[in-house]
Image: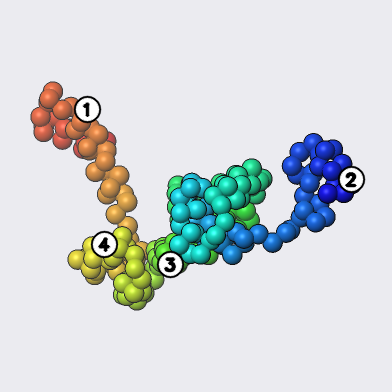
Amino acid sequence: MTYRTVKQLADAATPEDLFTGQWQNRPSILDDYKPHIDDRWNEGCTNAWKLWEEIVPLGYKGSYQRVRAYLRQKRTSPRPVTAPPPSPRAVAGWILRRPESMTESEQLQLKTVRTHCPELDALTRHVRSFAIMLTERQGERLPDWLDAIRRDDLPSLHTIAAGIDCDRDAVIAGLTLPWSSCFVEGHVNRIKMLKRQMFGRAGFRLLRKRVLPA
C-alpha cells in the first residue's frame, strides 16, 4: 500500500468515510443475487443465514459475511417516510358521501385507494349509482344496476342483490313513487317507546289511551 492509502485508512472515523473513490460502487460477487434478496426482504424474510442458504443453490460462491453485511446496510439505511393508510371507516365515509361535499384532499385519497384496489373502485361506482337512483327516483334503472353488480366479484353486494330480487317490485316502487312511509315509522317508534315505558305495569287499555289522545 502507498502512504496515502494507509493514511486514509488511519484517519477514517467511520467506515462510511472510506466509501469514496475506488472504494465506492465496486462490483461484488453478490450483485447478481441482490434482486432475489431484496424480493425476499420485502416479503418479510430478514434472516441473513436463511437468505445465504437460499442463494447458494442459485450459484452464489461468496461468504455468509457478505450477505450479512448487505442486510445490515439495508437495516441501517434511512427509510422513506410514507403517510399511514386511511382507516376502513374513513374509506367507507368517502364512498358514501356526495363527491361535491368532500374536500380536495379526501377526493385525492379516495382516488388513490380506488387506483390500488379494483374491488373498492367497483364498489364505489355501484354505491354512487344507487345513490343517484335513490335521490332522483330512477327506479327503472334498478334491473340494470343488479346486472352490473353480478358481473363483478363482490360477494357482499351479491347478497344484497338476492334480497332485492325477493321483493323487486316493491323496491322499484320505493325508488320511483313520491310517497314515503317515514311518518308511519315515526308513529311505530313512538308506540314502541310507550309500550316499553309501561312494560310489566299496565295492559293494552292504558296503552291505547296514551296513544290516541296524543
**Label pair 2/4, CB-CB below 8 angstroms:** no
Which residue is disc 1 drawn over?
197
Q: How many other residues sit within 10 Å of disc 1, few (<14), some (14-19) or many (≥20)?
A: few
Residue that appears at 45% across and 66% down: 118
User: Can residue 63 be seen at all in this image of the molecule?
Assistant: yes
Among numbered discs 3 and 4, the one appearing first in the sequence: 3
Q: Position of residue 95 (x, y in %)?
A: 47, 57
Q: Earlier in the sequence, mark 2 or mark 4?
A: 2
Residue 90 in the image: above or below residue 123 = above
> Tag 4: Cα neighbours inside 10 Å, few (<14), some, or many (≥20)?
few
Tags 2 and 1 touching, CB below 8 Å? no
Disc ID at residue 159: 4
Tag 1's secondary structure?
helix
Q: For the residue labelled by badge 4, is the local secondary structure a helix, a strand or a loop?
A: helix
- The total number of labels drawn is 4
Say whether residue 161 is left or right of residue 132: left
Q: Residue at x 79, y 36 (%)?
A: 13
Q: Looking at the image, which residue is at 54% across and 49% down?
A: 64
Residue 142, given in percent of the width and then of the height, sits at 33, 72
Q: Nearer the viewer, mark 3 or mark 2?
A: 2
The residue pinned by badge 3 equals 122
Of mark 1 and mark 3, the one earlier in the sequence is 3
Relative side of 190 to 68, left or right:
left
How far separated are the C-alphas under marks 2 and 1? 98 Å
